[in-house]
Amino acid sequence: MKLNKADEMEMYINFKSMRLSWVFVNVALVTWLAVTFIKTGELPFILFMITCFQNMIFFGCKLYITRQISSNEK
């Protein structure tokens, strides 16, 4: 099976889809966290950690890739 490289349009579609799915999951987790906190008065630790790690990985990768690309342009 031969794999073809994605063209610019396909890459744009993939990145846009990933961003939208990240936003959906993030909003769903924060909503679930808020509802649980309002109902029980306690912060669900595992749910909170998943949300934090997801955002740390996203923004960390974004920072790393941005720096890598900008250093290659110089």
Image (spheres, helix red, strand yellow):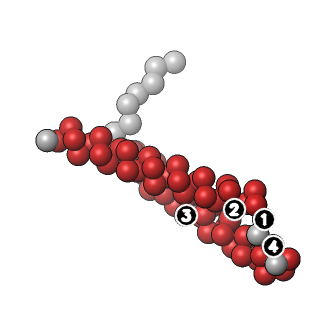
Residue 8 sits in quarter: top left
Residue at the image point whose x is 66% and y is 69% from the top: 30
Q: Mark 4 and mark 1: span between their CA atoms?
A: 6 Å
Task: Give neighbour class at mark 4: few <14, some 14-19, many 20+ (Cα, 10 Å).
Answer: few
Q: Label 3 neighbourhood size at 10 Å, few (<14), some (14-19), many (20+)?
A: few
Contact between marks 1 and 3 (CB within 8 A): the answer is no
Mark 1 vs mark 3, foreground winner is 1
Q: Which residue is mark 4?
A: 42
Q: Which mark is residue 44?
A: 1
Find residue 70 and report its image quarter: top left
Q: Is residue 69 visible?
A: yes
Image quarter where the C terminus lies is top left
Query: Residue drawn 52% across and 61% down?
Result: 20
For badge 2, the amino acid type reads Phe
Q: Whole-Å distance between the Cαs marked 1 and 3?
A: 20 Å
Label 4–label 1 contact, CB within 8 A = yes
Mark 1: secondary structure:
loop
Q: Amino acid at mark 4?
A: Glu
Confirm or deny contact between disc 4 and disc 3 (CB under 8 A): no
Give the amino acid type for the residue marked by disc 1 in the picture.
Answer: Pro
The local crowd at label 2, few if under 14, some if 14 to 19, many if 20 or more residues have their Cα within 10 Å, is some
